[in-house]
Image (cartoon, helix red, strand yellow):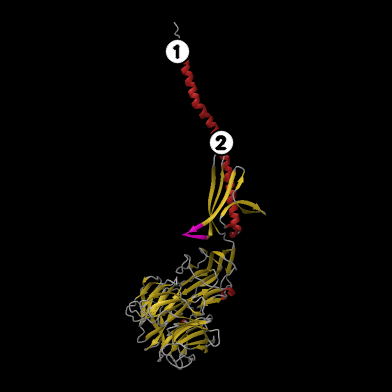
Amino acid sequence: MAWLPKLTKGQSLVELLVAMGLAAILIPAFMAGVMASREGWAQQEQRLAGTASLREAVEAVRAVRNRGWTSFAVNGVYHPVVAAGNWQLAIGSEVLGDLTRSVVISDYVRGGQVDPSTKNVVVTVSWSSPLANSVASALVMTRYLDNLVYTETTEAQFNAGVKSATFVTNTAGGEVVLGAGGQGDWCNPNLSIAALDLPKSGVANALTAIEGRAFAGTGENASGVSFANVTISNANPPVAAIAGTFDGFKTNGVFGEADYAYLATDSNSKEIEIINLTTNPYSEAGYFNAPGNGSGDSVWVAGNVGYMTDGAKLYTFDLSSKSGSRAQLGVVNLADEGRRVVVSGTYAYVATEDTSGQLQIVDVSNPAAMTVVGQAGLAGGGEATDVYINASASRAYVTAGKLFIVDISTKTGSRPTVGSYNTSGMMPKGVIGVSGNKLIVVGSGGEEYQVVDVTTEGSPSRCGGLNVDTGVNGVASVMEQDGDAYSYIITGDAGAEFRTIAGGPGGRYSSSGTFESAALDPGYSTSYNRISFTGATPSETTLTAQTAVSVDCQSYTFVGPDGTSGTFYSVTGGSLPLGYNTGRCFKYKLYLTTTDAGTTPVFYDLTVNYSP
């Protein structure tokens, strides 16, 4: 018997509703999948087109940068175009069919400062259909290395620079080496060179010198002239002669330049007297009147700033002009009366009468707001009378009852003494550094002129000397560009105050020297990007450098790779970034040293890359 299905009333309607429900769910999903697949292909095509357009724009930007930084490094929104067969950047974004392309150039900030040699570049390509999206590339672009290049390598180029205990040779086209140092003669001084009688009968007490010139002043009494300009011939032996004099003051200190001399005087109204050496007779150009009724004890000039000690104060004054009353810039209190001030870089070093702080180190990076940052107490020493700073400003040599060697490689805090020398009955008044790791200490009593070998700092030793019974009141030294070396002294002999003592050449190299290049002046403001040096440093020698960029081609501050005066480039070859150096004129300064008097470092060339 056959069974027939039993039909329930309404069953077909239920099945129909289920089928319609499934269709309502599946058909839209299927259609969406079909549509997404179609749009996905279109989106992928847009992305491929956008990426190709992006790559083209990036290459265009690089080409524009390589052709010239000035036309490239202007902040804004651009797009690449081809003109005269070259890529260029036109203002604004561009529309390429469905794509929009833009190049955005903006400043790059490094260490909180805008770096003029670097730019941020963002290249973007975007589209709005089938779905809004974009591709982008962020770039950091620097100046192209081959914009403009200057190379200094010839004898003629080097001879335009300023040499101090250095010499230019022409062994391989032009080099800078240490000058002859006279190490063989410093230790055997004599008074065979004719003395010079300064005018009137006063006792000279102040002395400084530059090549071919010495500047002397009275101090112990007012019977002599205030100032005598002494010319010294470049002969063998040299001949000293009076070029001119100036009177009217009792002089305690003197500083000389080619056209001006600066006197520290006892005058209450003109503690510093500025003398014009270009007039005949010499005349007053200007003066500095410090507050109160003190007197100038010592004077130093660095650039457009003058420095004077007056009692227990260090003053700075404006020398942007030499005429008339010069304005005070700043003042700082010292531990005691300042007997001598020497300025090197951004620091002033003051020898004081404070027997527990004979040397004070003053930060003068801002002459209007000076601060005492370091000091040295010289155990067993008395009041300081003089200080000499070596070329690298790493050592201070202080006379304070005897000679002390102070480590000032770090400027702040209490500075240590690394050595001392007993002058054996001589009361030292002055000290000067000469070539061959030698110092000359002068004074009264005992042996008044002593040559000290400081090759071994921990135990300096006497290597020569002279008896000058009338006493030696001051000493200066000059290393001539041709290698001759001399010291000049002023004595208590009223008939033969000025004496010249030969110290070289002796056939050996100076222990240290500097070379400052002539200015590179493109004639417009530019950015100096990279430098490279070539040099040789045999064993026991060093060769380092600093650079300076000036806006006005007058004032230069030499700095190292971190932008401070306390660091130096190592001259071993290769390119070195200059950092943020925008200005008109460029100079470099070399520092050469040797501990072997028969060996010298050699500087061959410098190349600087810059962009107009």
Q: Quadrant of the C terminus?
A: bottom right
With 48 as the anchor, is 390 left or right in this view? left
- Magenta segment boundaries in residue numbering: 108-115
Q: Quadrant of the N terminus?
A: top left
Residue 92 on the magenta segment: no
Nearer-N-terminus badge (2/1): 1
Alpha carbons under labels 2 and 1: distance apart: 48 Å
Please tell me whether residue 165 is drawn above or below residue 606 in the rendered image.
below
Which secondary structure lies at badge 1? loop
Which secondary structure lies at badge 2? helix
Label 1 neighbour load within 10 Å: few <14, some 14-19, many 20+: few
Please tell me whether residue 337 is drawn above or below residue 224 in the rendered image.
above
Residue 110 on the magenta segment: yes
Quarter-of-image position of residue 412:
bottom left
Q: Position of residue 456 (x, y in %)?
A: 39, 77
With 3 as the anchor, is 335 left or right in this view? left
Labels 2 & 1 near each other (Cβ < 8 A): no
With 442 as the anchor, is 284 left or right in this view? right
Q: Which residue is mark 1?
A: 9
Q: Which residue extends farthest right? A: 84
Q: Position of residue 272 (x, y in %)?
A: 46, 82
Closer to the eye: label 2 or 1: 1
Which residue is more in the foreground, 200 or 139?
200
Q: Is residue 317 shown to the viewer in this render?
A: yes
The kind of residue on which mark 1 rests is: Lys
The kind of residue on which mark 2 rests is: Glu
Q: Which mark is residue 39?
A: 2
